[in-house]
Image: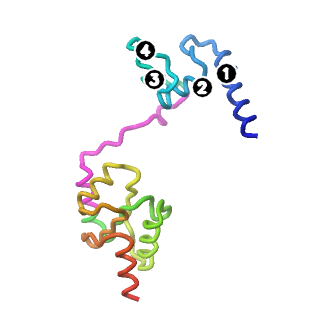
Amino acid sequence: MARVLSTTLLRGLMRSSRASTSAAVSLPAIQQFMNYSSGLGAAPNANGDSMATRVAADHDTHQDFQPTSKSSDMSFSDIVAQDVKEHPVVIYMKGYPDAPRCGFSALAVKVLQQYGVPISARDILSDLKLKESVKAYSNWPTFPQIFIKGEFVGGSDIILTMHQAKG
């Protein structure tokens, strides 16, 4: 079934690229996609470089949906310092409290939620620079990393041990 579907899809793409009357579109649709997504399959340029990624203007995409740059005047280390200072409980984790992306992060969130305190969280998987800044700030290599009242406490193992010792 999957083979029939993929064959049909490829044939449709090839037909649509042949039917196109635009002079700017000279490659079949699948090759255009490959050029855009990975640089593979591109025709060599004047320098013989076939790995150059070419992105044509997409006339069908509204400007509201174009990628934007999220720049800030604050460095990542400043962001971490501000988070730790402003929030009573901060967890730098893989994923978010509602959708953890690793078992250790899920365990840490579950233990913290037992106490009913608001948890401020940041997903370290979304930005490698944030991840490295948190590691440098705490001088600790693993995640999740939990800060309570401005102090680095540890990870899920430490929080679990503290919780079990209390009970």
Residues tagged 3 and 1 counted as in contact (Cβ below 8 A): no
**Residue 53 falls left or right of residue 130:** right
The boundaries of the magenta stretch are: 60-83
- How busy is the neighbourhood of tag 2: few (under 14 within 10 Å), some, or many (20 plus)? some
Label disc, if present, on residue 14 of the rendered structure: 1
Label disc, if present, on residue 25 of the rendered structure: none
The residue tagged 4 is 45
The residue tagged 3 is 54
- How busy is the neighbourhood of tag 1: few (under 14 within 10 Å), some, or many (20 plus)? some
Q: What is the three-letter code of the residue carrying label 4?
A: Asn
Q: CA distance from mark 4 to mark 3?
A: 11 Å
- The answer to which quarter of the image holds residue 12 is top right
Magenta span has 73?
yes
Identify the image's colour scheme: rainbow, by chain, secondary structure or one colour.
rainbow
Residue 55: where, in percent of width, then height?
46, 25
Residues tagged 4 and 3 counted as in contact (Cβ below 8 A): no
Residues tagged 2 and 1 counted as in contact (Cβ below 8 A): yes
Q: What is the three-letter code of the residue carrying label 3?
A: Arg
| Placement of the N terminus among the 4 image quadrants | top right
Question: Could you tell which of marks 3 and 1 lies nearer the N-terminus?
Answer: 1
Residue 26: where, in percent of width, then height?
57, 14
Residue at (66% x, 15% y) in the render: 18
Of the pair 98 and 50, the residue shown nearer to us: 50
Q: CA distance from mark 2 to mark 3?
A: 14 Å
| Placement of the C terminus among the 4 image quadrants | bottom left
Question: Could you tell which of marks 2 and 3 lies nearer the N-terminus?
Answer: 2
Q: Is residue 123 positioned above or below 21 on the image? A: below
Question: Could you tell which of marks 4 and 1 lies nearer the N-terminus?
Answer: 1
Q: What is the three-letter code of the residue carrying label 1?
A: Met
Q: So how many labels did they put on this image?
A: 4
- The answer to which quarter of the image holds residue 53 is top left
Q: CA distance from mark 4 to mark 1?
A: 23 Å
